[in-house]
Amino acid sequence: MQEPKRYIAHFDLDSFFVSVEILNNPSLKGKPVLVGGYERGVVAACSYEARKYGIQSAMPMKKALQLCPHAVVTGSSRGEYSKYSRWVTEIIQSKVPLFEKASIDEFYCDMTGMDKFFGVSQYTRELREFIIKETGLPISCGLSSAKFISKMATNEAKPNGFLEVPHGRETDFLWPLGIEKINGVGKQTEQQLKTFGIYTIEDIARTPKEIMERYAGKWGESLWNKAHGRGTADIETGWEQKSMSHENTFNSDYADISFLHGELVRLTEKTAYDLREDEKLTGCVTVKIRYSDFETTSRQETIDYTALDDQLIAKVKDLFNKSYQKNRPVRLLGVRFSQLIPFTMQMSLFDNNTGKLNLYKAVDNIKNQFGSSLVSKASSLRKKS
């Protein structure tokens, strides 16, 4: 039996952070908008109008304002980003059989088999238009036989467009493009390949695979396969079920709030460390309490996506305080983070958290070098008897 043709749609919310800011303040529309910290901060995201001045994400804000002194710097809608991301996620979840949330503003959808009931191209277009109508957010989309081609098609469709690469026409789309258009090809690889006379994706395709491996090492084979339109169509559906957790069963039962709070801080720090090591953000926190009689309760809440200790500790304590039955001895506490998504540059730079994030990463590095027991918050240290 012949395998069905694979159809993968890639959706990317255009200038997501800027778009949310404009929704909440329509007067910003058409203006050069910078989202992030002020003069001592960095640009987390910028509008297309700002990009015309040479401004890019991660650029120091001071430099961006030198390039465009009349740019509007904002970050007033920071609490709305997770809300809008979840809104789009819920729409996609209700409309497609399989999808993968690749980041806060990026999705892969498997449309395979839907051509039996709908025209895949038409259905994908209608889904994109529905998201725009419901949320007011601009979103670009690419449709093809493979994930990487769909993502590249999305990039070519921006801003706020749709581009389909039909089956059998993959190389027609890919070959005219410059090598820098391939996802993952950075400046160093680009310059390296250009020294060998490779400027376009067609140049890669026409170079023998063995030579490409010589030019680009192990990645050479992957580049060669991509240049011929070969790529995975596998969707990672378990992203929402994946979680990270730590729990501890005590040698004795405790009802001392200060001790229990200290233990929650320790467990949260440990799990947040794992989160950053895996370059993930969490959107849901769960606190588990097991009492001395083995009765077990758990409480969870969604949060704005984060990997910062202070925000996570505050939510963990809040959940514990809402759940804990006062003066009742506890034998086990647990902290779990779920709804994990990949860490994005914008999330790491936004909201003037650069210094805070760098502090946590510096502490993480110390733990990696000297052991996790060396550094911990004072509140997580147990009282010595």
Image (cartoon, rainbow, N blue to C red):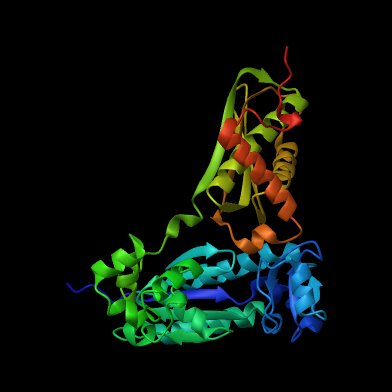
Q: Quadrant of the N terminus?
A: bottom left
Quarter of the view holding residue 42:
bottom right
Which residue extends farthest top? 385
Is 162 located above or below residue 34 in the figure? below
Q: How many numbered circles does the render carry?
A: 0
Is 209 located above or below residue 144 in the figure? above
Q: Residue at x 58, y 68 (%)?
A: 105
Residue 246 percent location from the top left of the image? 56, 35
The answer to whether 352 appears left or right of 172 in the picture is right
Is 63 located above or below residue 171 in the figure? above
Residue 204 versus residue 181: which sits nearer the camera?
204
Residue 155 versus residue 246: which sits nearer the camera?
155
Quarter of the view holding residue 65:
bottom right
Is 355 located above or below residue 254 in the figure? below
Which residue extends farthest front? 195
Q: Residue at x 49, y 50 (%)?
A: 242
The answer to whether 298 appears left or right of 176 in the picture is right
Q: Is residue 220 visible?
A: yes
Residue 35 percent location from the top left of the image? 74, 70
Q: Quadrant of the C terminus?
A: top right
Residue 58 versus residue 255: which sits nearer the camera?
58
Q: Is residue 221 visible?
A: no
Residue 22 percent location from the top left of the image? 74, 78
Residue 98 percent location from the top left of the image? 42, 66
Q: Residue at x 54, y 43 (%)?
A: 244
Residue 176 versus residue 317: which sits nearer the camera?
176
